[in-house]
Image: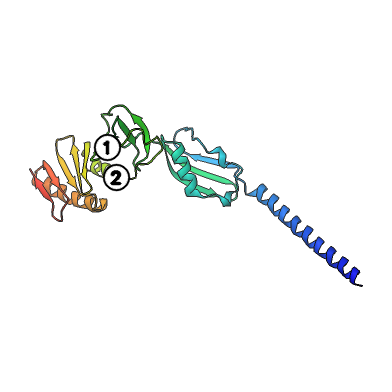
Amino acid sequence: MLSKLLKNTFFKNLIKTVFAIGIFLAAGLFIQDHYQIKNINLQTRDPLLVLGIEKYRKQISFLLNEKQIKDELDKANPQLTINDVKISLPDTLNIKVEQNAGTALLKNDQGMFLLAGNGKIIKKEAKAITSLPNINYYQKFSHLAYSPGDKIDFADIIFSLNLIDIIQDFGYSIDSIDIQSPTMIVLNLNSRKKIVVNPEKKAADLKEELNIITKQLKIRGMSFSQLDLRFNKPVISF
């Protein structure tokens, strides 16, 4: 009786184990068949070569991390801006990308870093590009310590890069930006005007303040030579 009972228990456990393995294998095959990345859609206006995208093909879609993919592709493609990465289940990876011509040049101890708007180094330059603002930082960056794809994520530099678009929206062009200290940035405009700001202020607040001042000056038919926006009340020099 005992031996029969043991045999029955053994066979029952064996059947359960085989059944569980069968379900596991079937689930694995189903996931591989339905949830592997098969389609990679590049959303771009121009044909672009994006390095590193093929490694995501055949990976399991719901195990991928969109932010990680974006960071990896951004690093691998210094000359491109990866605007967005979205996974569409079950099997599609969507990547929105565009060419990046650069926002400004940051001086280093041997030349220049061409920077994107988010602080990413697009490439190294031996000399200035006249069409882009030059950023002079109060501490020299090492040319050899950074490579294309790396990010210069200093808060005052990112702030300065964001200001470029804001200032240009008001019809001004920036020749150079002097980041003189953690609380003082001087924007040198091509019209020989200067705008002095504190990077501890919010860019949106500076934009609103600049909007009010420029409107008032326009009504009065006046033009500033220097505009200091570091303090609660602007200091305007004519």
Q: Amino acid at mark 1?
A: Lys
SS assignment at label 2 = helix
Image location of residue 210, percent across then percent down = 19, 49
In this image, 225 relative to 60: left or right?
left
Image location of residue 42, percent across then percent down = 50, 39
> In terms of image quadrants, where is residue 27?
bottom right
The C terminus sits in image quarter: top left
SS assignment at label 1 = loop
Other-residue count near label 1 (Cα within 10 Å), few / some / many at <14 / 14–19 / ≥20: few
State the residue position of label 1: 140
Other-residue count near label 2 (Cα within 10 Å), few / some / many at <14 / 14–19 / ≥20: some
In this image, 122 relative to 132: left or right?
right
- The front one of 102 and 44 is 102
State which mark lies toward you, 1 or 2.
1
Residue at left offset 26%, top offset 41%:
164
Label 1 to label 2: alpha-carbon separation: 21 Å
Compare marks 1 and 2 and give the one earlier in the sequence: 1
Q: Give the farthest residue toward the front.
A: 2
Circles 1 and 2 in contact, beta carbons < 8 Å: no
Q: Give the farthest residue toward the bottom.
A: 1
Which dot marks residue 162? Answer: 2
Residue at left offset 81%, top offset 61%:
14
The N terminus sits in image quarter: bottom right
Q: Amino acid at mark 2?
A: Asn
- Residue 80, compared with residue 210, is above or below; it is above
Image location of residue 80, percent across then percent down = 42, 36
